[in-house]
Amino acid sequence: MQFQCDTTSRKPIYRQLIDQVRRGIARGQLQPGDRLPSVRQLSRDLVVNPNTVARAYTELEREGTLLTQQGRGVFVAEPGNDLTKKARRKQLSEKLDLLFVEAVHLGFSAGELLTMVQDRIGQFAFVTEEKDAP
Amino acid sequence: MTDVIRTFRLTKHYDTRRVVDCLNLQVQRGQVYGFLGRNGAGKSTTIKMLMGMVQPDSGEVELLGEKVSAMCPKTRERIAYIAEGHPLYNWMTIGEAVRFTRAFYSNWNHTLVEQILDHFELSRKQKLRRLSNGQRAQVSLALAVAPEPELLILDDPTLGLDTVVRRDFLESLIQIIHRKGRTILFSSHILGDVERVADRIGIMVDGVLRVDCPTDHFRESVKKLVLDFPGPAPEAVDCPGLVNSWNLGSQLELILVGYDEAQRTAVEALQPRSIEIIDLNLEEAFIEYTRGRKRSLPLFAMEESRHDQSIGDQGIA
Amino acid sequence: MIKALAIKELRESAGLMALASLGMVWALAGLMGVNPLRYLSGGYVAPDQSIAFVNDSFATWASVLVGGLAVALGLKQSAWERGRDTYYFLLWRPVSRRVVFGTKIIVGVFLVVALLAVAIGIYGWWASIPGKKPAPFEWSMTFSAWKLALALPLIYLGAFLSGLRPGRWFGTRLIPLAGVFVWVFFASAVPYIWLFIPMLVLGYFGVLVAISYFVETSDF
């Protein structure tokens, strides 16, 4: 996966890196167990301060997305289920609401939105359906 | 942590103009400090005082714990200084410049110099006079890092370099940072570079160090608020941390430092129809901050704390 | 590192030194009667009646050429680096300012004295060849020329001080040089060697103290 950083963006660099890793995982470009470039390597490639890269990695590690193995490197973690399904569902509905607000404002019908969701869904790596799913 | 650079109430006048005003600057070991300010804000004079090239009217400078005014040459071996414009002896060839500089140091990383010169395809026979600005900057950097200094102080090292060459220079700088425990202070006009490289920034406005905090911290605390009013907008708002405001008919734009509860209450008291909070990138934040009403700029000097996003407004200067 | 500094100073002075040497060659040629311009004028060449060093124009030529070198070299060695910002490079090297400026001055004084000494030597050697001059030559006749060799380095130091001292206006910056000129002029006018020497020593002392003061305290 190719990382990028854009200093004209209003997003801080460490945030950009976090978002890129998360997007990479969501799209299946990064699989659990994949190794990420080291802090040094990424710092050199992107020409950013190593502390900025370290900060992004630390944050991703804290939320359970990445895993550091001493001496071996930084890896994509197995998807964790720290939160209950209910809590995760709540988080997602909040995001969905944001999407709906935007769609209404831009003048899309519910049907059009559904079609768009169907079209794009294939680009992402979803987990297979869990048993307890309603 | 130890302070590698430390100034005590450093002050300098040119004629009656106070160029640097009671500056207390502290840079810790391992930090990469971006030193910012508009032209004439006192950055260059400050750096020259750090190096003992300009004598302060009052105050003291300590580098690596030693007073600059009485620093022994041995300590200077551990500190590299690149002045603005990369001054070197133009009549020398690259090889002569290397030989000349090397004569002063007990520690000289020959391989490193060779690597840098090879990497940028610089022949030792080339005269410095004939080099481009970018090549000159690389030679100057090679000479500066060869004695493996603990502290590097660079005065606007990318000034006058084009985008590609600047990137090369930053790459070299990042390589230097990879060495643990190295401290760098550099001034720059290019905010994108500063954001990439600096952990911490200091902003001088009219000789006063107004900002001294982690880089992300500054850009996250300067916010632009757009208030929409049903009728004409009020002329001004009085709240702590206000840097600037513009009345645009039915809209009021505010630049605020450290948007918090108190400010929100003050802004909501104006009863606008809507409030839009806009994040700024470092360059925008710098521009909005430094062109504010100078005397009333809110200071902020934050202690190092990576995940603490609260802003302590230290009052009005 | 002193060697590196000295070589650098020599290299940077080479241009001025070459120019002054060329002038000296031309002047000596004239004194030895091989001035090509005299033949160009095509007219009558007066027989040389002068006595070497005593009543010929050697002292005048030496004052103008070596004095000119002293002034130019002094200004160049101190002010030139300021104009090109190379002091920021040089003065951060791990060596004391005393050594940096000391080396500059020693090289400068050496060059000034060397040019004069070589000129005295060559001209003296030529004048000592029988038949070249109407009067027999004695090395003691070069006494006044050696007096010049004592005085001109002071002019050099005055110029160095002028180039070093910060000052907004060029005119006021030249005050030290002008002062040294007047001092040297008076000292040379004094007919007593026992007074000439102390006056020079006093001059050297004053200028060197001023230089070391500005080296430590002025803004570069």
Image (spheres, helix red, strand yellow):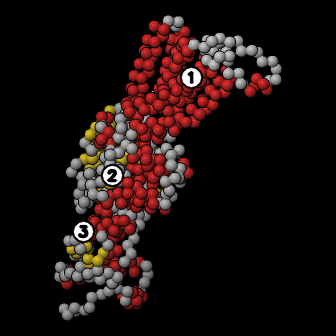
The vertical placement of C80 against B122, above or below, is above
Q: Which residue is mark 3?
A: A58
Q: Nearer the viewer, residue B135 or B233?
A: B135
- Res. C11 in view: yes
Q: CA distance from mark 2 to mark 3?
A: 30 Å
Q: CA distance from mark 3 to mark 1?
A: 79 Å
Q: Estimate the x, y position of residue C154 in percent, counting from the top left.
A: 49, 21
Q: Which residue is mark 1?
A: C121
Count residues near mark 3 (Cα–Cα under 10 Å), then give few for <14, some for 14-19, many for 20+: some
Residue C102, numbered circle: none
Q: Amino acid at mark 3?
A: Thr
Q: Estimate the x, y position of residue B16 in percent, counting from the top left.
A: 42, 31
Q: Tell me where residue A103 sits by quadrant.
A: bottom left
Q: Helix, strand, or loop for circle 1?
A: helix
Q: Nearer the viewer, residue B46 or A87?
A: B46
Residue C7 in the figure: left or right of residue B58: right
> The C terminus of chain B appears in which quarter of the rendering?
top left
Q: Helix, strand, or loop for circle 2?
A: loop
Same-subunit check for callouts 3 and 1: no
Count residues near mark 1 (Cα–Cα under 10 Å), then give few for <14, some for 14-19, many for 20+: some
Q: CA distance from mark 1 to mark 2?
A: 50 Å
Which residue is depicted at the point 63% across and 21% down? C126
Q: Estimate the x, y position of residue C196 in percent, counting from the top left.
A: 48, 10
Q: Tell me where residue B7 sits by quadrant.
A: top left
Q: Which residue is mark 2?
A: B148
Which residue is depicted at the point 45% across and 52% down? B139
Q: Chain of mark 1?
A: C
The vertical placement of B91 against B221, above or below, is above
